[in-house]
């Protein structure tokens, strides 16, 4: 790699093919902490990357904000410009980068900062093929490369630099950028996130940063317009149908930390990842973000973006993870989501159990026995109406649901026949949609679907609307379940 800012070059085109070629890129662009760079290259290699386009003298909004706030104050400072690397499955020629052909197989991009302690800036990469079928909190990002408009669907990633940004800052940014790209909030720079941390709740000076406390993180999410739910793993909620585990005891007879045995975290994490919201994990001295999950038989594996590792890290178990025991979880949500996911699922359990009488009594019994299980997701009312058509139900059901008046955000709780899920068949036997602006103490149902009947409950005391429905299961709205 030559001088950081090459005055007479727009960039370059590379065609790494063999492992030594990729290792040379790691040497050039990895900095002092190259593990995330190695993981990035491994992700694109899995997707058969054949071309890397290096964009020189790139003005990055996030790095420039950090440069103005911190790096420019040094006596010996770094360049105010970044580089950006784009990855493609097609073999591209240097002479055609100004007018790329269609279907170039854009795999995403990575911003490269001139900061040795953390070279990886804003990054969005397409998931590798090994994660096919996973539930991922992805975004669609659009970038312009020399005037060529490119898109990529993936999860955002960033690396801490050790001074201006620490792990909590980049974890908060990953959650924020996801919300920005799906239209929940305007964009905020990484430096602005660091500056949003209130100094009065920490003994440390703001810069160089020592990180953020949980109280500071909550304040930052509030300032970003995404107040966060907080879960302490030592006090997990009880949910109907989710087994309460037995605390584990060590050899001294003392209870182990809940992060080493409390399986209730799985349902909480999956509930929000199913909804497209990343989950920030806090440990004793680290923070990272869960961006997805997948089912491997009866085993659930999580997918993380950890600034010390890189994007799309596959976690076999939180109980054996290198950062175990996990201590807390934070999930930034839209401001008008008042109803918690656990309250919504408990309400759906009670509603289905109460209505499943007579010929439907086996449904209530299966729910109690665990052969029918509830799966929840938070989605917009319009998304739910749009998806109903793909669930293979009747036109009468489609008409009733699409003409229903639903809140902007609603909890959708599906009752899954587990044996049908395992056989990859239509598995939803009942469904309850709840108003996300209602209270945890009295959740309000908007739609109830049972075998043979669908009902909608208009606001303002409107008359309940019903229609007959078939008794066969219908398709789930979830990618993984």
Image (spheres, rainbow, N blue to C red):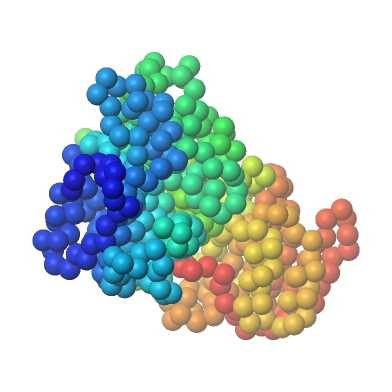
**x, y (%) of residue 147?**
46, 59
**x, y (%) of residue 312?**
33, 57
State whether residue 369 appears in this view.
no
Report whether 228 appears left or right of 445: left
- Viewer-side residue, 12 vs 108: 12
Report whether 412 appears left or right of 328: right
Report whether 472 appears left or right of 255: right
Residue at image position (79%, 61%) is: 405
Q: Is residue 101 above or below residue 52?
A: below
Question: In which quadrant of the rendered view does residue 170 lie?
Answer: top left
Q: How many marks?
A: 0
Residue at image position (40%, 69%) is: 100
**x, y (%) of residue 110?**
34, 52
Q: Is residue 416 above or below residue 413?
A: below
- Viewer-side residue, 192 vs 149: 149
Question: In which quadrant of the rendered view does residue 174 lie?
Answer: top left
State the residue lying farthest toward the left: 20
Residue at image position (62%, 53%) is: 344
State whether residue 6 appears in this view.
yes
- Viewer-side residue, 176 vs 361: 176
**x, y (%) of residue 323?**
27, 42
Residue at image position (59%, 67%) is: 414
Q: Is residue 73 above or below residue 103?
A: above
């Amino acid at each position: 790699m030559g001088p950081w800012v090459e005055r007479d070059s727009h960039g370059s085109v590379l065609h790494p093919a063999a492992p030594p070629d990729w290792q040379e890129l790691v040497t050039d662009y990895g900095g002092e902490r190259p593990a995330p760079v190695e993981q990035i290259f491994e992700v694109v290699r899995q997707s058969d990357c054949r071309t890397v386009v290096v964009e020189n003298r790139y003005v990055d909004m996030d790095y420039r904000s950090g440069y103005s706030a911190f790096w420019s104050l040094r006596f010996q400072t770094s360049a105010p410009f970044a580089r950006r690397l784009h990855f493609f499955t097609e073999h591209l020629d240097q002479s055609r980068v100004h007018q790329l052909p269609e279907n170039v197989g854009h795999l995403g991009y990575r911003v490269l900062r001139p900061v040795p302690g953390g070279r990886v800036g804003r990054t969005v990469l397409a998931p590798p093929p090994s994660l096919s079928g996973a539930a991922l909190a992805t975004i669609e990002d659009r970038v312009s490369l020399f005037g060529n408009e490119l898109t990529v669907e993936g999860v955002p990633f960033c690396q801490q630099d050790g001074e201006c940004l620490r792990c909590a800052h980049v974890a908060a940014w990953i959650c924020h950028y996801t919300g920005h790209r799906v239209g929940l909030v305007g964009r905020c720079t990484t430096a602005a996130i660091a500056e949003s941390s209130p100094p009065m709740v920490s003994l440390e000076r703001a810069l160089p940063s020592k990180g953020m406390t949980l109280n500071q993180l909550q304040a930052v999410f509030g300032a970003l317009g995404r107040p966060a739910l907080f879960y302490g793993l030592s006090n997990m909620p009880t949910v109907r149908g989710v087994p309460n585990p037995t605390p584990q005891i060590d050899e001294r007879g003392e209870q182990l930390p809940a992060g080493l045995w409390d399986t209730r975290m799985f349902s909480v994490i999956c509930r929000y990842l199913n909804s497209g919201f990343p989950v920030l994990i806090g440990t004793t001295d680290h923070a990272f973000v869960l961006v997805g999950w997948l089912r491997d038989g009866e085993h659930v594996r999580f997918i993380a973006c950890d600034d010390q590792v890189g994007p799309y890290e596959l976690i076999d178990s939180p109980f054996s993870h290198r950062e175990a025991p996990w201590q807390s979880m934070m999930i930034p949500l839209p401001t008008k989501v008042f109803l918690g996911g656990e309250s919504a699922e408990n309400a759906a359990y009670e509603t289905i159990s109460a209505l499943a009488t007579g010929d439907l009594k086996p449904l209530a019994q299966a729910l109690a026995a665990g052969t029918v299980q509830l799966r929840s997701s938070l989605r917009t009312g319009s998304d739910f109406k749009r998806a109903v058509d793909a669930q293979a139900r009747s036109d009468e059901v489609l008409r009733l649901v699409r003409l229903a008046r639903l809140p902007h955000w609603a909890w959708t709780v599906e009752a899954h026949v587990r044996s049908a899920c395992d056989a990859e068949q239509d598995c939803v036997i009942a469904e309850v949609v709840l108003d996300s602006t209602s209270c945890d103490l009295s959740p309000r149902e908007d739609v109830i679907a049972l075998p043979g009947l669908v009902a909608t409950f208009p606001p303002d005391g409107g008359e309940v609307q019903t229609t007959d429905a078939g008794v066969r299961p219908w398709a789930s709205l979830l990618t993984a379940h």
